[in-house]
Each structure stands twice: as structure tokens, then as C-alpha cells.
């Protein structure tokens, strides 16, 4: 295909500009002006009058990311969209999105979409992307392989139906998520939809949220016990609560701050157990001002609010926010939305129909779909139906057909979910059979929602430049294997959650799963072998109640065997109604690691070459030989030995953490980092001292001052974990600080492995 660059407003014909003005008439005036301003900057960039670095921040704030190009196919087997200009892999400085098609992220507040918006999304996917709409774990929609010059047209067409991409990326308030069944859930205190919508409009472009050091994520949940909102893992998590005051029901929120996943997950801290609804927006504004003023700016790796809350402690942070709240001038928008809470209320399309619940059918496919994908609403006679999307993907023609189905069976009550699915609400029970038939026609009736087959995955090495291993490839393989045996699977196994990330960042939410994986790499016999770190013990319920810990790294091709092994262990070893998380905790890391040890082995390249490729990619992960000379071999052996020792020590730290031996865990984690640093140094100086102070000084000189250690994407991030641990010491840390230390040690060691891999690929002198 040939791409014709879209002209800017300065280059278009009069008739073309008239078409754009027609779209503008349907937009919020402010949004229209912002798109015009972006288009002007795009024109200046084409003229070479704006630096790449400056334009990069501009495009990120409009949701436009650079994208990875490494081969012509996705890891799920679909061919990537043709890239007509420039050649694949060509980049120009830091602003790679200018040189080749990238990814466009589209904000969908609380996941709510109308059929009209779905139609536009389908059109854009076909005209500008690869005909795929990808649902993210933040209820966004992403289009891949989008040319930057096309984005103003995309922005205008989205804005004409009430959708913006502003602040979908960058150091800003990201998409505000909320429970996808809000308003219909049996356990909710009240419907949080209107509150999430008000928060979105209030903070979008607000001056107090423009000077953050990093991104800021907000989520709403209607209740404590379920996982729909995942309040525990957010910078700001809001859980609906009600209480009686003078005989009247008063609405408010449990207000949590400082949560987050990423490389080192933090559980959010309770700021207040009840923030009245009229204080929701002003208090959030005060939090934003404190974060903007005191949050880290220079070291981006500690620039999330979770680090500020952890460093200050929740009491100091709370005092600062409450003091700031007193200083803010009143804003009518703080409470104006409260008089319009019911504007977003939804209602059924067919009232008074025969709404009996179908208990059984002659169609076994319907019965299984009904069991897994349908749940009753709190409104009698109606149900919630979930479409389980494979890896979060929905084709443009499916999106358009689903929009028509929504028109037929609902008043447009469609929501995306944080599990990368789509929900239809207010389905009359009497319509379920007909709805199932309609969904089967468009291949959206896969009866796997809420089961182990419904796997969450980030894009990984398909399109993400941070990807290490093929997360989508592994997720697709697991889904296929598990689907084949799901019909005879024990119910306890069917309920498990599997989540996959392509790197240490938790875009696939691996920390919250029963069985999680994140991409790493290892050097074996002169080859770089794709691996996944296995993470166990996460708790998805109770708004992401607790996080799992890494247990062991396994080659990518052995990851499916890990799932089989763990499932078998659980079925044979669980006690009565013991859940998987409790089973893992009781068994302990030592026993689990021992049970998986044989799966960590990588066969020799001459015995089984498949281990040296990743899932869905026919190419070898690498064929770079590190050299066969005795000298190089000896040095490599010393480095490998040191890194393996660090692996052992961080595992011991995790065991100590599991046993609540806080000082021991902190000490072992620090020791593991020092050992890894010493291992790297031995590649250059085999006689390095065993003294920690000398090792750290040498590491700083040899690997940090020279930037050899610095990953091209993570920068100095992981080196700082070692230096921070040195300055903080190992005694008297709070339990959450110890857990953070152990997590950071694991990441430092992974970075040391990566550094070793990069050095081993250099020519041997």
C-alpha cells in the first residue's frame, strides 16, 4: 500500500479545509482549538522549526507513541501493516514516531462508549491503522501503525463524537478508569460513573496537573471486595462508601494514594476512610498540587507519587495535602456536577418484556456461554454480558457489528474493561438467546470470560520498544493450549488468573495475577535466550489486594509447562477450599522453586534450537556468539558465577521477606545487589575486593560514570536502587520498604544480566 501524507491546514485545499470545519462544528470548542494548535506544531516540525525533543513531549500529550519495528509479523501471526516510508527500523534521534508509523492511544473515560463512537473507532482503524482496535488494561483503545501526519484528522473525527486523546500519554493524568458494571453491580455502594466523568472533565488540561514528573493514574470502584476498580494499585484510588448522617444517607469515598505497579509495586495508603462527595474534586486538586510541587523531577525513575508517599509517610503527606486544600480558591466545578448525577444513568431498551432468566437451553454452546459470560444485574430481569476479546483485540468489522448489536439490544450501554474485554449491560434476560446467536455470527461469543483462558497481555515485543520477550506470543500459546483442555479442567483451575508482561513494567498487571510472567533474557552457551520471570501469589480481588513476588526465571518455551506444573501441584496439594494464593503462601518459595527447577534448564543449541526463538517468531532470539577464547571464556564464567550468586541471595531475601524477617530480608537484598555489581566488575577486574564500599565505588566508576550499565530505556534507574540501598542501610526499615528493597534488588540483578548480555555482544579484543 502507498501512504499519502495528510496535509496540514496550511497546505490543504479550500474544500478539504471546509470538511475539517464541518467536523469542528461538532466539537467542544476548546478541543478544536487544541487540535489546531497541535497541527500548527506539526507543520513547524515538518519545516524543521521545532526540535525533536520538544515535539516528542507534544505528541505524547496527544497520545502518540513511537513504536517498535523488528520484523514483518506480529507474534500472533498476523502480518503487520505495510510501512511505506521510511525503511523499517529507520529512526531519527529520540523522536522515532516522526520517522515511522507509531501507536495512537485514545482515552475512553470509565470505559464508556456509544455505538456512534464505536463506528468512528472502526472507521479509523481501517483507514489509518491495521483494522484492529486494541483494548488496554486502562480501558483505552489503541491503534497501531498510525502515521503522525494523520493524527490531526484522527483527533478531529474522534472529537466530533466526544472523544479526546489529550493527556493519554506523557506526564499527565491518564485515562480515568472505573468499574465497567457500575450502576448494575449488586455489591456497589452507589454508581461511580458520574463521579469518574466529572473527575475526567475537571482534570483534563487543568493547570494544576501540567507539571508532574511522571504520569498519574486514577481509578473508581463501587465496592471494596471486587476487582473492577483496582483502587489499590493506583496513584489515586477511590472506593465508594455511604454512611448515615442525621438520618440521611451521605455519599463519599475511601481515598487511597500512592499505589502503583510498574517495576516495583506499591500498595496504596489510606488517606481518609470518608471523603464527602463535595470534597472529591478539591481534595484531588490539592493532591495534584503537592505532587507537582514536591514530586521528583530530575530522576524520572522515582517521579511517581508512590515514591513521595513512601518517603514522607502517609501522615506527613496527608498533613501537606490538607494544608494545601485550605489555600485553593473555590471553584464552582467542584460541586456543579452533583446536581447532574443522574444525567448518565442508563435504562433498558425493552421495558416490561418477558424477562425470565433462561436456566437452560438445548444448545450446549449457549449454556457454557451463559455460565461464564453472563451475570445478573441488581436490576431484576436484566443481565451483564461480557465479550472476551483474544489478547484485547477486536477487528474493525467486529467493532462495527457490535455497535449495531448494542443499538438493537440496549440504549448504547457499552463499556471496555481493565481485563481487555467489552461489556454490554441492560440486556433483557429474554434477549439472551438471540444475543448469543448474534455474537456467534461475528465471532464474539467465546465462552471463556473469567476463566484461566481469558489471559491478559501487554503488546510486548510486537510493538513496544521496551519489550524483552514476546508476551502476546506466550499469552496466545497459553490461551490455545488451555482452551483445548478447558472442557475437562477442574473448576479450581478454571478460576485462576494469568497475566503476561513483556518486561519488568507491569503493563500486563502480572503482579496481580495468580500466575504472572514478565519478560527477561539470559545468556546460555553464547546465545541470548528469551526467558520469563514467574510471579506467584498476586491477589486480583479486593481491588488488587496484594502483589505477587518473582519466584524463578524460566526459558520462554518452558513457560506453558510452568502453568501445567503449578496447576497439577495445586490440585494435588490444596487443602479443602484453599485458594491458590493461600496454597502458594503455605507451600513457600523454597518448595515452589524446587518443584520448578528442572524447567529452568535450557537444552544445548544443538539439541533443541526451539528454545532459542520466542513464541510466534521464527527468527532466533540471537545468534551472536560471545567468542570461544579461553581468556574471554574465563572472564564470562566469573561474571556468570557472580550473577548466579546474586540470584541465590535475592531468593533468600524473598524467603526472609515471606517469613517477616525484615532486617534479614533487607540485608540479603542489599548483599544480592552488591554481589551482582561485583560479578560485573570481575569481567574487567577479577581481583576486585569483597568489601561492599569498594565494590560500589568501583561499580559507579566503571559502569555508571561510563554509562555502560545504563539500559537505553531505563537509564540510570536500576543503578540508583543500589546507591539508595547503600544510603538507607538495612536496619529498621518498615515492612513495605523492605518489600520494595527486595523488588529493587531483583530488578538490579536483571539489569546486571542485561548489561552482561550487551557487553558479551561486543567484539572481543
Image (tube, rainbow, N blue to C red):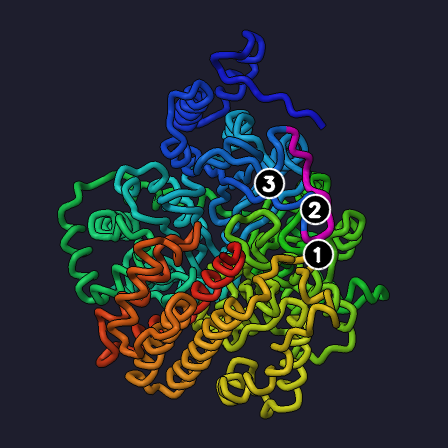
Q: Nearer the viewer, mark 2 or mark 3?
A: 2
Quadrant assignment, res 514: bottom right
Residue most extreme to the right = 362
Question: Which residue is at a point 41% across and 46% down the rendered structure image?
Answer: 174
Q: Where 722 falls versus 281 (above or below)?
A: below
* Few, some or many residues within 10 Å of mark 3 (<14, 14–19, 20+): many
The Cα–Cα distance between marks 1 and 3, rounded to whole angstroms, is 19 Å
Front in this rendered view, residue 395 or 567: 567
Disc number for residue 249: none
Q: Nearer the viewer, mark 1 or mark 3?
A: 1
Residue 96 falls within the magenta-colored stretch: no
- Residue at the spot of label 3: 144
**Regarding mark 1 in the picture, which secondary structure is present there?**
loop
Q: Where 639 falls versus 147 (above or below)?
A: below
Question: Which residue is at a point 47% across and 26% down the rendered structure image?
Answer: 27
- Image position of 713 (left or right of 608): left
Disc with the residue nearer the chain's start (2 vs 3): 2
Which percent across, then down, holds residue 67?
54, 42
Question: Which residue is at a point 41% across and 35% down the rendered structure image?
Answer: 56
Quadrant assignment, res 436: bottom right
- Residue at the spot of label 2: 73
Residue 82 falls within the magenta-colored stretch: yes
Front in this rendered view, residue 92 or 454: 92
* Few, some or many residues within 10 Å of mark 1 (<14, 14–19, 20+): some
Disc with the residue nearer the chain's start (1 vs 3): 3
Which percent across, then down, holds residue 512?
49, 68
Question: Which residue is at a point 50% across and 69% down the rendered structure image?
Answer: 631
The Cα–Cα distance between marks 2 and 3, rounded to whole angstroms, is 13 Å
Which percent across, then down, holds residue 313?
22, 67
- Residue at the spot of label 1: 616
Q: Which residues are magenta?
A: 75-84
Query: Is residue 455 something one can see in this rendering?
Result: yes
Amino acid at each position: 500500500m502507498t501512504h499519502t501524507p495528510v496535509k496540514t491546514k496550511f497546505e490543504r485545499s479550500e474544500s478539504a479545509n471546509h470538511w475539517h470545519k464541518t467536523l469542528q462544528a461538532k466539537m467542544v470548542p476548546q478541543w478544536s482549538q487544541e487540535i489546531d494548535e497541535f497541527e500548527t506544531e506539526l507543520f513547524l516540525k515538518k519545516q524543521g522549526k521545532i526540535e525533536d525533543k520538544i515535539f516528542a513531549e507534544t505528541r505524547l500529550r496527544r497520545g502518540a507513541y513511537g513504536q517498535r519495528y523488528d520484523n514483518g509479523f506480529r507474534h500472533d501471526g498476523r502480518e503487520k501493516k505495510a510501512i511505506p516510508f521510511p525503511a523499517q527500523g529507520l529512526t531519527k534521534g529520540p523522536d522515532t514516531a516522526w520517522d515511522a508509523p507509531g501507536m495512537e492511544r485514545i482515552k475512553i473515560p470509565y470505559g464508556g462508549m456509544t455505538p456512534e463512537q464505536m463506528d468512528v473507532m472502526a472507521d479509523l482503524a481501517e483507514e489509518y491503522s491495521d483494522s484492529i482496535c486494541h483494548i488496554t488494561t486502562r480501558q483505552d483503545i489503541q491503534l497501531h501503525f498510525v502515521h503522525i501526519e494523520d493524527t490531526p484528522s484522527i483527533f478531529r473525527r474522534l472529537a466530533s463524537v466526544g472523544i479526546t486523546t489529550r493527556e493519554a500519554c506523557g506526564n499527565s493524568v491518564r485515562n480515568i478508569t472505573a468499574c465497567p458494571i457500575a450502576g448494575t453491580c449488586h455489591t456497589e455502594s452507589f454508581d461511580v460513573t458520574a463521579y469518574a466523568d466529572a473527575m475526567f472533565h475537571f482534570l483534563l488540561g487543568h493547570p494544576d496537573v501540567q507539571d508532574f514528573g511522571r504520569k498519574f493514574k486514577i481509578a473508581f470502584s463501587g465496592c471494596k471486595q471486587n476487582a473492577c476498580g483496582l483502587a489499590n494499585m493506583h496513584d489515586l484510588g477511590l472506593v465508594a462508601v455511604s454512611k448515615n448522617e442525621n438520618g440521611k444517607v451521605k455519599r463519599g469515598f475511601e481515598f487511597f494514594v500512592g499505589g502503583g505497579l510498574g517495576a516495583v509495586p506499591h500498595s496504596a495508603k489510606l488517606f481518609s476512610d470518608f471523603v464527602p462527595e463535595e470534597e472529591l474534586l478539591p481534595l484531588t486538586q490539592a493532591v495534584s498540587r503537592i505532587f507537582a510541587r514536591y514530586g521528583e523531577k530530575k530522576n524520572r525513575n522515582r517521579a511517581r507519587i508512590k515514591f513521595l508517599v513512601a518517603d514522607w509517610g502517609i501522615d506527613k503527606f496527608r498533613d501537606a495535602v490538607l494544608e494545601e486544600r485550605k489555600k485553593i480558591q473555590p471553584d464552582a466545578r467542584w460541586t456543579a456536577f452533583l446536581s447532574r448525577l443522574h444525567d448518565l444513568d442508563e435504562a433498558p431498551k425493552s421495558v416490561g418484556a418477558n424477562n425470565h432468566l433462561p436456566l437452560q437451553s438445548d444448545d450446549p454452546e449457549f449454556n457454557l456461554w451463559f455460565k461464564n459470560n453472563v451475570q445478573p444485574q441488581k436490576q431484576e430481569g436484566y443481565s451483564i454480558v461480557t465479550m472476551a476479546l483474544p489478547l484485547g483485540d477486536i477487528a474493525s468489522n467486529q467493532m462495527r457489528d457490535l455497535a449495531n448489536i448494542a443499538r438493537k439490544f440496549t440504549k448504547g450501554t457499552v463499556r471496555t474493561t481493565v481485563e481487555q474485554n467489552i461489556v454490554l449491560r441492560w440486556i433483557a434476560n429474554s434477549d439472551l438467546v438471540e444475543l448469543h446467536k448474534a455474537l456467534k455470527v461475528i465471532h464474539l461469543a467465546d465462552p471463556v470470560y473469567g476463566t484461566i483462558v481469558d489471559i491478559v497481555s501487554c503488546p510486548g515485543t510486537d510493538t513496544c520498544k521496551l519489550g524483552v520477550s514476546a508476551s502476546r506470543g506466550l499469552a496466545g500459546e497459553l490461551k490455545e493450549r488451555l482452551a483445548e483442555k478447558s472442557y475437562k479442567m477442574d473448576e479450581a483451575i478454571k478460576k485462576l488468573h494469568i497475566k503476561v508482561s513483556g518486561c519488568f513494567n507491569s503493563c500486563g498487571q502480572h503482579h496481580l495475577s495468580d500466575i504472572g510472567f514478565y519478560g527477561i533474557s539470559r545468556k546460555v552457551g553464547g546465545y541470548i535466550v528469551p526467558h520469563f520471570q514467574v510471579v506467584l501469589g498476586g491477589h486480583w480481588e479486593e481491588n488488587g489486594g496484594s502483589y505477587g513476588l518473582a519466584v524463578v526465571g524460566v526459558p520462554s518455551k518452558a513457560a506453558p509447562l510452568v502453568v501445567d506444573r503449578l496447576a497439577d501441584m495445586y490440585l494435588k496439594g490444596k487443602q479443602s477450599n484453599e485458594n491458590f494464593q493461600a496454597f502458594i503462601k503455605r507451600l513457600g518459595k523454597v518448595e515452589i522453586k524446587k518443584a520448578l527447577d528442572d524447567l529452568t534448564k535450557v537444552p544445548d543449541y544443538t539439541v533443541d534450537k526451539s528454545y532459542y526463538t520466542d513464541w510466534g517468531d521464527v527468527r532466533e532470539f540471537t545468534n551472536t556468539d560471545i567468542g570461544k577464547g579461553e581468556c574471554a571464556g574465563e572472564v564470562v564464567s566469573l561474571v556468570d558465577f557472580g550473577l548466579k550468586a546474586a540470584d541465590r541471595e535475592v531468593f533468600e531475601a524473598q524467603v526472609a521477606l515471606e517469613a517477616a524477617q525484615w532486617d534479614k530480608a533487607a540485608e540479603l537484598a542489599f548483599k544480592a545487589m552488591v554481589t551482582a555489581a561485583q560479578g560485573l566488575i570481575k569481567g574487567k577486574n577479577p581481583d576486585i575486593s569483597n568489601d561492599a564500599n569498594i565494590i560500589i565505588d568501583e561499580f559507579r566508576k566503571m559502569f555508571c560514570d561510563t554509562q555502560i550499565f545504563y539500559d537505553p530505556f531505563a537509564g540510570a534507574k536500576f543503578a540508583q536502587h543500589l546507591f539508595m540501598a547503600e544510603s538507607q542501610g538495612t536496619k529498621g526499615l518498615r515492612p513495605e520498604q523492605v518489600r520494595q528493597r527486595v523488588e529493587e534488588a531483583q530488578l538490579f540483578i536483571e539489569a546486571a544480566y542485561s548489561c552482561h548480555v550487551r557487553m558479551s555482544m561486543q567484539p572481543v579484543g
